[in-house]
Image (cartoon, rainbow, N blue to C red):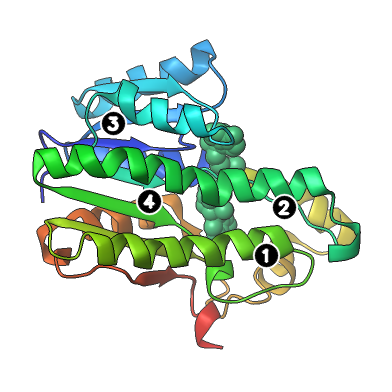
Amino acid sequence: MSFAGKTAVITGSNSGIGLGVARELARAGADVVLNSFTDSDADHALAAELAKEFGVKARYIAADMSKAADCRRLIADAGTCDILVNNAGIQFVAPIDEFPTEKWDAIIAINLTSAFHTTAAALPVMRAAGWGRVVNIASAHGLTASPYKSAYVAAKHGIVGLTKVTALETAQEPITCNAVCPGYVLTPLVEAQIPDTMKEYGMDRETVIKEVMLARQPSKDFATVEQLGGTVNFLCSDAASQITGTTISVDGGWTAL
Ligand code: NAD
């Protein structure tokens, strides 16, 4: 399906999954708004490259997803928002009794509360346009837990709940809301961890990927950002018009265990 004439706003999209999702939406013809909290020449250049490569309009809007006003301003500054992908996210790992309060607050703000604010701002815009798609990038940790990831797991379970409520409140409108739950995805950040993990465990690249990093991913293979983008494109397509309030796992079998 072509998304020509539609505008997609993707939070946290100057790298990783967000950028991959933006690229696949642009490949399918959507105009895209990239976002992160920084405001560098490189951020704006990313948007210019995307516009050139796919022949769409692309802009970069700096907005800090840990701040309510910035979340709402992102949608206002975008001007229109047919597709909203809530993707911005951070991680921190520590036992609950040692988990720094400021890290808890930041993870809940960026990984969960930002999606409440952007969705609240975007729904009236989608209603006025008569069509809309909200896709929340949750995680396998939106459906299962791991020790030491209390804030992340709580935020990701929370966003699955927010997805269901958004879907119910829009169920009789041409708007859907779903969550994508990736397992481990090969992003530049994950790639960068491989050499250190190889050193730490004294293992070669293949062994460290299969036995350490993908210990819980039965496929023993990473998902790619292109596959995540393809999943988002499917959820935005007409074929998915009756899919709402649910999760799609892209986790190589993690949640089947
Ligand atoms: P990443 O670090 O490459 O991307 C995170 C993005 O969020 C970046 O663009 C970053 O600039 C942005 N961001 C961070 N703080 C922000 C803030 N305050 N305001 C605006 N933007 C902010 O990581 P990623 O792996 O691409 O993660 C993207 C999403 O996918 C996250 O929600 C993450 O939880 C989820 N996820 C990732 C994996 C994985 O294996 N990589 C697995 C499951 C879920």
Q: Mark 3 points at which residue?
A: 32
Q: Which of marks 3 and 1 is nearer the N terminus?
A: 3
- Upstream in the sequence, badge 4 or badge 2? 2
| CA distance for labels 4 and 1 | 19 Å
Q: Where is residue 36 in the image (x, y as percent from the top left)?
A: 51, 29
Left or right of 83 on screen, residue 225: right
In the rendered image, which quarter contains the C terminus?
A: bottom right
CB contact under 8 Å: marks 1 and 2: yes
For the question of whether residue 87 can be seen, the reply is: no
Residue type (three-letter) at the residue carrying disc 1: Ile
Q: Nearer the viewer, mark 3 or mark 2?
A: 3
Q: Mark 1 points at which residue?
A: 209
As drawn, 31 above or below 24: above
Label 3 SS: strand
Which residue is under mark 2?
194
Residue underneath mark 4: 226
Q: Residue at x 34, y 17 (%)?
A: 48
Q: Residue at x 54, y 52 (%)?
A: 112
Distance from the alpha carbon under mark 1 to that under mark 2: 7 Å
